């Protein structure tokens, strides 16, 4: 029997209540007065089966812990960069500055992509896009083609988790920057 099918009935306590159809002829607790009442069998005339409304689309909202993670990563990255370039600049050699770049760049990129992918996921949850790729394309249409440079992970990857996409994008940009420095300063 469909678990979501519910039977609405007037309980012996006088309240109108509903119970899962599979609880027919069993004791259920009235949510209004908390008395234990007997649910009618599903085929009695006044017990009308009604379908419970659909729950919110799965994956609509990601846990707020993830948002907190992105904020923390972003702040840690910015703080790290400020520390390296404003406070401890003279303590590092050029090659050391390059080597530690991914350490602060990675959390910044990770945090930013986390924000963006949560935004895109909300677009999916609102029914305005079917996939992250479609949602990203909507942004590219609005912002222009340059946005594709930033949003391409969403076009390529078919994941629905902001965490996975953000990690992949952050690794990509950190490695790219590291390669850029390595090519720019081959002597380092
Ligand atoms: Zn009651």
Image (tube, helix red, strand yellow):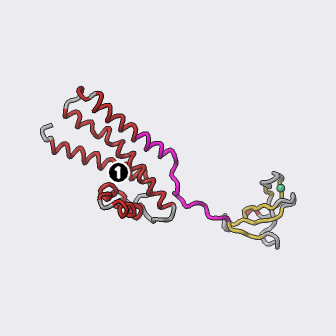
Q: Quadrant of ligand 1?
A: bottom right
Q: Is ligand 1 within 8 Å of the beta carbon of the residue shown at mark 1?
A: no
What is the residue that sits farthest to the top in this orientation?
91
* Farthest residue, direction left: 187
Q: Which residue is mark 1?
A: 168
**Count of numbered circles on the image:** 1
Q: Nearer the viewer, residue 164 or 127?
A: 127
> Which of the 4 image quarters holds residue 80?
top left
Q: In the rendered image of this protein, does residue 114 appear above or below residue 57?
A: above
Tell me what residue is drawn at x 38 percent, y 50 percent: 113
Quarter of the image where the N terminus is located: bottom right
x, y percent for residue 28: 79, 56
Kindly identify the residue that appears in the image at 72 percent across and 62 percent down: 20
Q: Quadrant of residue 102?
A: top left
Q: Residues within 10 Å of mark 1 (few under 14, many from 20)?
A: some
Can you say whether 3 is above or below 82 in the image?
below
Query: Nearest the camera: 107 or 139?
Result: 139
Judge whether residue 90 is colored magenta: no
Compared to residue 84, the image places residue 159 above or below, namely: below
As helix, strand or loop, the secondary structure at mark 1 comes to helix
Residue 148: x and y, percent? 31, 59
Q: Quadrant of residue 46?
A: bottom right
Q: Position of residue 98 (x, y in %)?
A: 22, 37
x and y percent of residue 37 in the render? 83, 57
Residue 66 among magenta residues: yes
Relative to 26, residue 169 above or below: above
Q: Is residue 74 left or right of residue 45?
A: left
Looking at the image, residue 91 sits to the left or right of residue 108; the answer is left
Image quarter (top left, top right, bottom left or bottom right) of the C terminus: top left
User: Which residues make up the magenta segment?
Assistant: 52-73
Q: Is residue 153 left or right of residue 16?
A: left
Residue at 27 percent of width and 38 percent of height:
101
């Amino acid at each position: 029997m469909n678990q979501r099918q519910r039977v609405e009935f007037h309980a012996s306590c006088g309240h109108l209540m509903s119970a899962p159809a599979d609880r027919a002829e069993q004791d259920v607790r009235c949510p209004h007065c908390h008395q234990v009442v007997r649910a009618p069998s599903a085929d009695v005339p006044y017990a009308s089966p009604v379908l419970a409304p659909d729950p919110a689309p799965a994956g609509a909202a990601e846990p707020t812990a993830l948002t907190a993670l992105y904020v923390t990563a972003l702040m840690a990255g910015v703080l790290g960069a400020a520390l390296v370039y404003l406070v401890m600049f003279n303590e590092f050699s050029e090659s050391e500055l390059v080597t530690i770049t991914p350490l602060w760049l990675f959390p910044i990129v990770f945090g930013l992509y986390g924000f963006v992918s949560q935004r895109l996921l909300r677009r999916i949850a609102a029914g305005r896009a079917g996939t992250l790729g479609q949602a990203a394309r909507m942004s590219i249409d609005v912002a222009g083609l340059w946005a594709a440079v930033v949003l391409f992970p969403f076009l390529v990857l078919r994941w629905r988790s902001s965490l996975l996409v953000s990690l992949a994008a952050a690794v990509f940009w950190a490695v790219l920057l590291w390669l850029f420095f390595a090519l720019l300063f081959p002597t380092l």
